[in-house]
Image (spheres, rainbow, N blue to C red):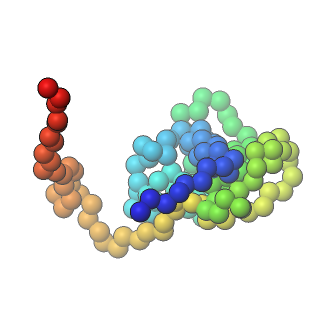
Amino acid sequence: MILPTLFSTKSDVFSFGVLVLEIVSGSRNRGFVPTKQDNNLIGHAWRMYKEGRSMELIASTLDEPVDPSQVLRSIEVGLLCVQESADDRPDMSSVVQMLCSEGALQKPKQPAFFTEREFHGADFSSSTYPTSSTNDLTVTEVVAR
């Protein structure tokens, strides 16, 4: 059964939040290499934020010095945009206002697509888990005469 998917302006806000986190961190959400605690960039940013270590997200490749307050604000706005409930996400006019002002921001809630994982003594070496799999598949192509 295929469930209908609803796209809205809140979907665009979510995408913008991901983009902000990618810019600040210098990492792509899709190509993010998971750590033992995080399964994607959003989860990593959320954990760092909750631990008070948001500044560690900053891309080490940035040439210019950054204003820590602007970076922290950008991270918080990015996390507000990727909250699990679309109703909790701001609209884009609010996002622009938050980025351009210096007022207090509401605290972000848990982001979407975030699962907290714990691995106690797990071995993730390639000898334990194969790096690829083999699928047997037969394809039959019907050609008209």
Number of numbered tags placed on the structure image: 0
The quarter in which the C terminus is drawn is top left
Residue 66 at x, y = what percent? 69, 37
User: For this rendering, which residue is in front, 113 or 78?
Assistant: 113
Horizontal side, residue 145 vs residue 13: left or right: left
Q: Residue at x 66, y 59 (%)?
A: 86
- The N terminus appears in which quarter of the rendering? bottom left
Name the quadrant containing residue 101.
Answer: top right
The answer to whether one can see residue 17 in this image is no
Q: Is residue 103 left or right of residue 129?
A: right
Name the residue: 60% across, 41% down. Answer: 19
| Image position, residue 121 (x, y; %) | 30, 71
37 with respect to 46 (left or right): left
- Give the x, y percent position of residue 29: 49, 46
Q: Is residue 142 above or below residue 83?
A: above
Q: Out of 89 and 31, give the one closest to the viewer.
A: 89
Q: Is residue 109 left or right of residue 4?
A: right
Q: Is the residue 102 above or below the residue 35 in the image? A: above
Provide residue 49's location: percent of width, then percent of height: 62, 59
Question: Which residue reaches farthest top?
Answer: 145
Direction front: furthest residue = 145
What residue is at 59 percent from the left and 38 percent from the top? 23
Q: Does residue 102 appear in the picture of this structure?
A: yes
Q: Which residue is at a point 71% across and 56% down the rendered structure image?
A: 89
Q: Is residue 120 above or below residue 30?
A: below
